[in-house]
Image (cartoon, coloured by chain):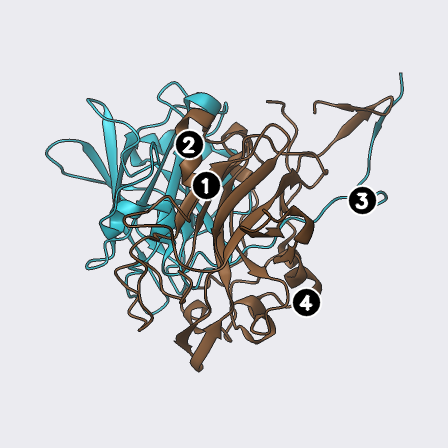
Amino acid sequence: MNGLHFYRRERNQHPPSYTPGYKSAVLRAPFRPLVSPEQSDLEMTGPVFGHSDVSPIDADLIRNAMVTGEAIGERIIVHGRVLDENGRPVPNALIEIWQANAGGRYLHTNDSYMAALDPNFSGCGRCMADAEGYYKFRTIKPGPYPWPNNGSDWRPSHIHLSIFGEAFAQRLITQLYFEGDPLIPMCPIVNTIPDPEVIERLVARLDFKNQMPFDCLAYRFDIVLRGRRQTYFENHPEGL
Amino acid sequence: MTHRLIDPRITDTRLKETPSQTAGPYVHIGTAPQAIGRQTLYRQPGPVAAEGPGTVVVEGTVYDGAGAPVRDCMIEFWGADAEGRVGRHGLFGRTTADFATGGFRFQTVKPGVHREGSAPHIAILIFARGINLHLHTRLYFPEDEGAIANDPDLKRMSPTDRAALTGVAVPAAEHKTYRFDIHLQGAKETPFFDV
């Protein structure tokens, strides 16, 4: 590792903490200003995961919880690249995902939605990006579902992603949405982000040419994590 | 040799960080399957980052602005090893609030000093439904009173805030145990960091 600090997190690229349109935030939002200490090696490093910690089947949600057969639903690939703010790939980033099944039901103790569970689908997966930051999952497209917020609100189809880069400062959990979903602009959770252009960066794009022929459609979703401040010596990036 | 620092205000060609979204109420499925009665994936981190003599236990509750326990949160902890080494030597784990009581518990080592002049501490992230971008706080240790008084980050904070970031030693049979409650909002709001 090198000693270069990370750029400060640009808070206007994230939802604010107090977002009354999303009611769960009302009592869970801190109001005091954040404390900004100098970054130390604790934040500039992070837990190290290896490819041997992850099995290839973990990235295939169509088959990773099979009991009697493959998961039911619209078969898709979700793939992309993990970069930092400097445009540099983040090698070996660990990505964990979770999602509802094709009917919009989660396999979770606290989900009581009437849609059926799929005995062959757990909605849990993970993979590790390669040396160039590329990652790939195979799954089914999750269904939308209702939730109590302003009466019956509906979540657009979405996949939750948890990402570890090379530093604890880069830690991120987010959700991806699917291009063309009319529920996106109606969702109170999406709309915790005030800027529509920022929301666009959470929308996975149909990537028709990267389909698996006669098997899966593909969606592309690139992820950007925080980057380190750069110093250039004679135009050669130093410390990269 | 020319040496110039690129000023980001002039050359703003940086990509923008992917925006955060709440981890939601079903965060356990992907990050802590054991909390919902399922097996973790191979080597998926859990609440025990270290075992054996000398390990410490941290227990507490996250409270919302109405004083109710946040029963669906997921907490990550990251600290140096006992010698103060980070990176590959650091200790990482995850725990979740108990659905019934709201309490969380994790086990790790008491970190050493990872930066000269800093008091030993563990970085703690909180993810939950209603938290749009994870919250970052720190746990310091009551026996490090002297180091806490001289810590460059803590020096600037009020005694109340320093106390809020310091665990309370509680009697326990097996492991040295600290109580660390986190208040998301209100008069006792915990200090959160932008690191």
Question: The N terminus of chain A is located in which quarter?
Answer: top right
Q: Amino acid at mark 3?
A: Thr
According to the picture, the residue beneath numbered tag 3 turns out to be: B13
Q: Residues within 10 Å of mark 4 (few under 14, many from 20)?
A: few
The chain under label 2 reads A
Q: Closest to the observer: A207 or B44?
A: A207
According to the picture, the residue beneath numbered tag 2 turns out to be: A54
Q: Residue at x 60, y 48 (%)?
A: A213
The chain under label 4 reads A
Left or right for B128, reference B115: left
Tell if the residue under mark 4 belongs to the same chain as the one under mark 2. yes
> Residue B96's x, y, as percent?
30, 49
Q: Nearer the viewer, mark 3 or mark 1?
A: 1
Q: Secondary structure at mark 2?
A: loop
Marks 1 & 2, CB-CB < 8 Å contact: yes
According to the picture, the residue beneath numbered tag 4 turns out to be: A196
Question: The C terminus of chain A is located in which quarter?
Answer: top right
Q: Amino acid at mark 2?
A: Val
Tell if the residue under mark 4 belongs to the same chain as the one under mark 1. yes
